[in-house]
Image (cartoon, coloured by chain):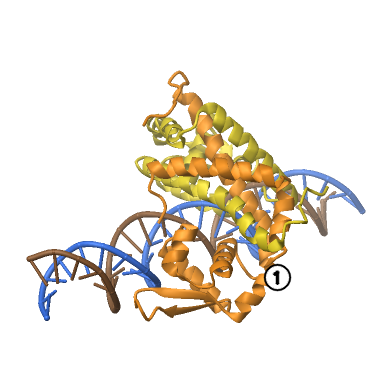
Chain colours: A yellow, B orange, C blue, D brown
Amino acid sequence: MDSPTPDSVPADELLRLDRQVCFAVHGAARAFDAVYRPLLRELGLTYPQYLVMLALWEHGTLTVKELGLALRLDSGTLSPLLKRLEGAGFVRRERDRRDERSVTVSPTAAGERLREHALGVPREILAATGMDGEGLAEMRASLARLTAALDAVAPGGR
Amino acid sequence: MDSPTPDSVPADELLRLDRQVCFAVHGAARAFDAVYRPLLRELGLTYPQYLVMLALWEHGTLTVKELGLALRLDSGTLSPLLKRLEGAGFVRRERDRRDERSVTVSPTAAGERLREHALGVPREILAATGMDGEGLAEMRASLARLTAALDAVAPGGR
DNA sequence: TTACATTGAGTTGTACGCAACCGATTGAGA
DNA sequence: TCTCAATCGGTTGCGTACAACTCAATGTAA
């Protein structure tokens, strides 16, 4: 499954081009972070913690494994993150009695209350992008295709 | 300068949508990392270190300040990173005699030799994206517009 | 020239993200 | 049943990234 690589372009040239592509993706990711940070700071969350809360608000209870699949994070990232969320009082962790290997994660009452304060975040983010729903959907689709192609090469997902 | 935010869409809905947008960007960035990692591992570089070397191969010598502007990284990230590159023997750091506050960074002979080994990387990345130059250029432009809009809200860049 | 603000690197502390590994639990085959 | 592989969560170590701070060097205004 080879791809269209113009062999006419000198590798020298590509040493600049390839940077711009991946560089643009990383730049956008960090620009997003910079917009999210002050908003989430008021909630006492970081962006990855916010993602976890979004998943829990939607599903109620998830195992660490399920969270990892949903957010593409492994236990090395999730374990300390969840410990901090638990320390902040937003989340409760308990061993699944039917499978003692699993740990279920659920929002506490404080975690549910936090949801109300988070409702305003998405609209501010949307406004900050300066794009409409259509443009964002299109970009999301493009990024999904790109990510899928990259994933096919490097197994990435956990 | 308000943006088109459809107030008809319930915030509830947005709590899922907004995740997908920013989430897709982060996902693509991490998928890129996963493809770069094994390639750069053979060179003894991480991706941010690779970016520094790209900049130095292109410009020969840069100050820490200039590197920070080019890569959007602050001294808190660059200082230890450059120290590791220096420890690996790819880079030389010296105080600028005309302005003792500045530190200039230059590739060593080993750093220059590394460039030859890095020439193959971009083509492999390009192939992994499964996209042609046109598609990538278009995506890059979209991401640049998005990043610019986000930067206007959160000063981000250092 | 002397205060004072500014600039440029560096350091510290916190939080991801990944690789590599560990221990306990569970499942599956001989 | 008994052994062994697979699964799940956790920990450690390393390398970013950012905020907040320090310190030396430089620029500027009185």
> Which residue is under mark 1?
B117
Q: Is residue A103 visible?
A: no
Q: Is residue A65 above or below residue B76?
A: above
Q: Is residue D29 left or right of residue A18?
A: left
Q: Is residue B87 above or below residue A92?
A: below
In this view, the residue in front, B90 or C22, is B90
Q: Is residue A84 visible?
A: yes
Q: Chain of mark 1?
A: B
Name the residue: 44% across, 69% down.
B64
Q: Quadrant of the N terminus of chain B?
A: top left
Residue C10 image offset from top left, x and y in percent: 39, 73
Q: Amino acid at mark 1?
A: His
Query: Alpha-carbon neighbours of circle 1 within 10 Å: few (<14), some, or many (≥20)?
Result: few
Name the residue: 45% across, 34% down.
A130
In this view, the residue in front, D14 or B57, is B57
Residue with the most extreme front position:
A8
Name the residue: 69% across, 71% down.
B116
Residue A125 picture quarter? top left
How many numbered dots are placed on residues in this image? 1
Determine whether the residue tagged by mark 1 lies in a helix, strand or loop. Answer: helix
Residue with the most extreme top position:
B8
Q: Quadrant of the C terminus of chain B?
A: bottom left
In this view, the residue in front, B83 or B58, is B58
Q: Is residue A118 above or below residue B127?
A: above
Residue A139 image offset from top left, x and y in percent: 59, 36
